[in-house]
Image (cartoon, rainbow, N blue to C red):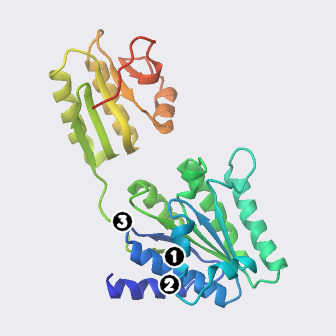
Amino acid sequence: MDTSQAGATVAAVGAMEYGSHCCFVSADEAVTRLAVHSYIRDGLSAEDRVLCLLGRRDRAWLMSTLSEGPTRPDDREADGSLVVVDVGRTPLWEGEFTPEGMAETFFAAVDQALADGFRGLRVCGDMTWGRAGGVEHAALLEFERLAGLGLPSRRAMGICLYDPREFSSVQIDAQERLHPLVAGTGRARPPTLQVTDTTKGLRLVGEADVGTRDLLEDALRRAMAHSGRDLVVDLSALEFADLGTMESLYRAATALGPDRHLVLRAAGPAVRKVVDLLGWSGAGGLILDEDRPSGECSGGAQ
């Protein structure tokens, strides 16, 4: 681990006060462990309650991180100063998730910590807890906004862990703009898109935006010219697609002619929503794989 980065991490976390809202971006596990350990250690020393929300970084990861110093996590859980919640197994909300409801839950946890005799509340969240709880990123972003609005008037602070291997660069950009404090090592790499040939068409991997538009359109033209059948575009590994990407796919579908289709395989909720809102499903030769009539299944891309 870069010692200068380690020092900057400790300084940034150590400078947090009540009302602070930090977006911590890093794919470096050593740096992230240091940040989490320092943040929780400082909170427990200050007689705060520390609430940890687990995601991909699970309980075993957290406990091994805390065991690297004098902190005894089991004892701290027993006295209520450390609260660990696996949101994927124990959601903090009832029924359907709403950003407003989650914000109210967060603020109620602050009030409860004060009522229990703690000086304040510190929240440490691996933000993949949203994915574990089935929360779309737009809703997670709105919750972060609401939490940020309420933090300055409360004896609470939060550090939100965003791993660039788990979130797209576009999503991290949005989160960094929302948080007053940004720390960590930053994103490991710029947005990229990989387009690979399959037996039925193309497979898109990564992030598709204006910077990768030419790459995508060249690949579509090549695939359309080399096949006389339906063109299947596998989106199962696509992390992000902007509206321009969807327009490129639609234009390619209309260029196939009346007897061929461009089939989007494994389209996520965001892609489906765009296709439905613009009325493109079944129009101009563009269809979603699950919308094909039975007997016309495209099969898995290889």
User: Quick check: 14 above or below 279?
Assistant: below
Which residue corresponds to the image point at 20% horizontal and 15% vertical from the top-left? Answer: 228
Which residue corresponds to the image point at 50% horizontal and 27% vertical from the top-left? Answer: 276
User: Quick check: 205 above or below 51?
Assistant: above
The disc, 3 or 1, on the residue closer to the chain's N-terminal end is: 1
- Left or right: residue 221 compared with residue 249: left
Residue 68's disc number: 2
Badge 2 amino acid? Glu
> Is label 1 in contact with label 2 (beta carbons under 8 Å)?
yes
> Is label 3 in contact with label 1 (beta carbons under 8 Å)?
no
The disc, 3 or 2, on the residue closer to the chain's N-terminal end is: 2
Q: Is residue 290 visible?
A: yes
Q: Looking at the image, is mark 3 or mark 1 nearer the viewer?
A: 1
- Tag 2 secondary structure: loop
Q: Whole-Å distance between the Cαs marked 3 and 1?
A: 25 Å
Residue 302's disc number: none
- Left or right: residue 195 compared with residue 56: left
- Left or right: residue 116 compared with residue 203: right
Q: Position of residue 103 (x, y in %)?
A: 70, 60
- Tag 3 secondary structure: loop
Badge 3 amino acid? Arg
Q: Looking at the image, is mark 3 or mark 2 nearer the viewer?
A: 2
Q: Which residue is mark 3?
A: 187
- Residues packed near mark 3 inside 10 Å, few (<14), some (14 to 19) or many (20 plus): many
Q: Which residue is mark 1?
A: 64
Badge 1 amino acid? Ser
- Quarter occupied by the N terminus: bottom left
- Residues packed near mark 1 inside 10 Å, few (<14), some (14 to 19) or many (20 plus): few
Q: Whole-Å distance between the Cαs marked 1 and 2?
A: 7 Å
